[in-house]
Amino acid sequence: MVEPKSIFKNFLWVICGLMYLVTASLWVVLPDTLTLNLSTALFTIGFSILMIIWDRRKFQKYYSGPYFYKLISLSISILLIFWILAAVNYLAYKHPRQADISDMEHNSLTFETVNMLKNIKGKITIRIFGRKNEILAIKALTNLYRFENNLIDVEQVDIELRPDLVKKHEIYKSGTIEIEYNNRVDQITEASELALTNSILRLTRKRDPQILFTKGHGELSLEDKGKDGIYNVAAILKKAYFNIFSENTLSLFDIKENTDLIVIWGPKTALMRPELQLIENYLGRGGKLLVGLDPTFNGDKHADLRFMLQRFGIKIDNNIVIDQLSFIDGSNGSVPMLSKIKGNHPILSIEEGPVFFPLVSGVRPGNNEESKKFELFFDLKTSPFPASWADNNPEEMVKGKVVFNQDKDFKGPIDLIGISRQIDGPTKVVVIGNSTFVSNAYEKYGKNFNLFVNAISWLVKSGEIDEFNLPLGKNEPVFLNRHQIGLIFYFSVLFLPLVFIVLSIWFYQRKKKL
């Protein structure tokens, strides 16, 4: 008859064995939770030592027998094999390789990204800030980059466990990816190959884009920290490594050759014809232009600027867009709000709004002969008529009585942004019927700033990619979610080993009886 004490002791040995299995599983599945893994490992080792001390009489027989020396020899051999495997694993981690055998190469990076990564010679650190369920999928994407270039390190930060790092790196959204290269840092919130590749391109480019903001006409100031300035815009652009500066174009003889973009943002007085001619000559050489033009109530001061813009395919009217279906509360429709951006252009590739424009003019395609040289995009629209229209009588706004006039006004939907790209050349022009939507007063409305930065980025593209040249049917890499990974873990790491252990015990007992 087996003593209860012996049964209890054997039960504890089984528990000890399971603890080693759990410890090994934790190191494999959750290698980044060092506190949990070390605590479990130390507890298991301590528990084993206590069991050996308690069962020391049985172990004394093994110490004095020939099996103990065989065990020591076997343990040393296993340890040597373990170190060899560890060295192989380290080399494999530092020089990763993979083969994609799917029909459409679903689990590979595009040709453009691979070529870009081959040309990078410095170390890149990619940090993933998120919750555990978000980090797994994002890390699967970033690991594809590490497979192509072993100078890329991928780190992950659980925002719930490390709020200190979240504060240090100024992370405001879970799922943010931070990329660091040569002491330059960029952050993206979209976990896609296109966004990550363009971020690396921005950090590794040899020259930062030069952006000229005009001044001297009452434009919104980059230095003004008040509610009417665009100091926050300047901070965002500088953080994205754009070199921005202000110039009075009336004092210039020519635009410098290295100027990548001219921004005319919210002028209150007219630009003189020599200035406009200077800008037009710059555009004729393949330059880029961004214009934010507000409606004026006391006569049109920007007729010459409007005429120049028509040559590039965009006509901006001096009117007020009214949207009585989607607007900011209290504005009576004069501040249109777009909750959903439905456009295929890269400038409009922002997450769902809202984006709003306080007192905005409508834009439409130019119909002159010169505009045929440009490819035009008009995708940011208000609600359909009769909910929205462009009111061409600014005096109605002053009086506070805005109504649709069949003879003068334009029926909705009304376009709020015009995008023009030269068909056979590099010239680009973007025109928005409002400038104050990115003033400091609206610093908490990030989608407005996203739209502005997207416009800047598209205009000064310096090697960045609008879209990948993907074959038909190409999908994003296939990533496993948290539940799928958990299923694989429990089935392969826990369930199957336990099944084999039970079967081995059963076969051993059966053989013993025979």
Image: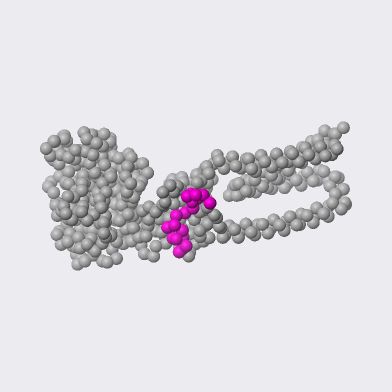
Q: Is 279 situated left or right of 347 in this image?
A: left
Please state, as top left, top right, bottom left or bottom right, where the C terminus lies in the image.
top right
The residue closer to the viewer here, 152 or 112, is: 112
Give how far across and how far down residue 80 sits, in percent: 72, 58
Which quadrant: the N terminus?
top right
Q: Position of residue 251 (x, y in %)?
A: 19, 64
Residue 502 in view (yes/no): yes
Asked if residue 393 lies in the magenta stretch, the reply is no
* Whole-percent x, y for residue 442 in the image: 31, 45
Residue plotted at (79% across, 56% down):
73
Residue located 57% across and 42% down the image: 485
| Number of residue marks | 0
Name the spot of residue 185 as percent of width and height, x first.
Answer: 43, 57
Q: Is residue 117 magenta?
A: yes
Q: Please name the predominant secondary structure of the magenta segment in the image.
A: loop
For the point 42% across and 51% down, which residue is it? 471
Instruction: Give the camera-side residue of 470 and 460.
Output: 470
Can you say whether 405 is above or below 360 in the image? above
Color encoding of the figure: one colour
The quadrant in which residue 84 appears is: bottom right
Q: Is 292 left, or right, of 240 in this rendering?
A: left
Can residue 141 be seen in this snapshot?
Answer: no
Magenta part of the chain: 101-120
